[in-house]
Amino acid sequence: MGEIATARPKRLAALGGAYAVSLITPLQSGLLGKNNGASARCRAELARLRKAGVNPSASFFLTGETIFERWPQEELDGLGASQFESDCVLRSVESSLNLYALHQQSEITPCAVVRREGETDEELGLQRRHASFGRACRQMEPDLSEAAGIQRRLRAIEGASDFDGVLYGMRQLVGLMKSSGKHATIPLDYWQLTYDLYLLRLAGTWRDSVLSRWSRDYFAPIEKKVQA
């Protein structure tokens, strides 16, 4: 019973991650594709997703068609999700979509890591390893001595008293991941991000496990490129 109770949060987090990516993938494809009509529809949808983050009380009716049209209720029931757990999955998906909409705004390159045509599992896995939230934060300024502002925001996320405080800090950092004079657009693995957002909603060790992994990914040494 203990093993089942331990495994279920991870399975629910993974379900949220898979569902979020299933929504982000066609949005990103339509936005960056050659079909102008599809691109316009996707831009309008991203605008609604960004607005929902500013006004959470209106989010269900701003984004309900996007989120609930294929909502995985059967899968949630199959995992024995309580109402609280289902609500946490919903909030993690909503929050991930809002962050993606902020990230992708005005960008002409993909901001979400998704499987590319012909890409193997190994290649996708390599992409994802370099696109965790902690690693993406490090890529904005690899020199730790110059990254005081980024580290200050990460500490504010760690010290946030509630989930809204966590999201506030994450929005600030995701906004900085957009292309700038110092770096190109930094992509994120939104499967992992949604997974992490679910666990951050839970108390105690689940939240700590996410923050410790972000810290590990952030402070891990930068690999030096080998000169040919």
Image (tube, rainbow, N blue to C red):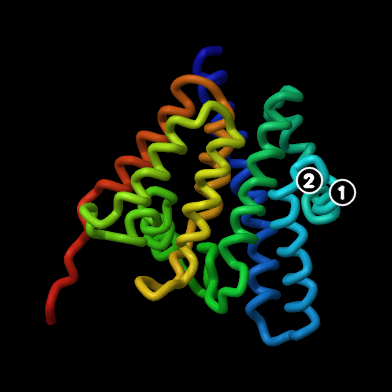
**Label 1 CA crowd tier, 10 Å (few <14, some 14–19, many 20+):** few
* Circle 1 SS class: helix
* Circle 2 SS class: loop
Q: Residue 166's x, y, as percent? A: 53, 38
Callout 1, which amino acid? Phe
**Label 2 CA crowd tier, 10 Å (few <14, some 14–19, many 20+):** some
Q: Residue 47's x, y, as percent? A: 74, 64
Q: Residue 4's x, y, as percent? A: 55, 20
Residue toward you, 190 or 56: 56
Q: Residue at x 44, y 50 (%)?
A: 133
Residue 213, which numbered label? none
Report whether 211 appears left or right of 162: left
Q: Residue 86's x, y, as percent? A: 72, 31
Residue toward you, 156 or 73: 156
Q: Quadrant of residue 164?
A: top right
Position above or below: 162 against 115: above
Position above or below: 85 against 49: above
State how many labels appear: 2
Q: Residue at x 55, y 41 (%)?
A: 195
Q: Residue at x 50, y 31 (%)?
A: 160
Position above or below: 88 against 170: above
Callout 2, which amino acid? Trp
- Disc 1 target residue: 61
- Disc 2 target residue: 71
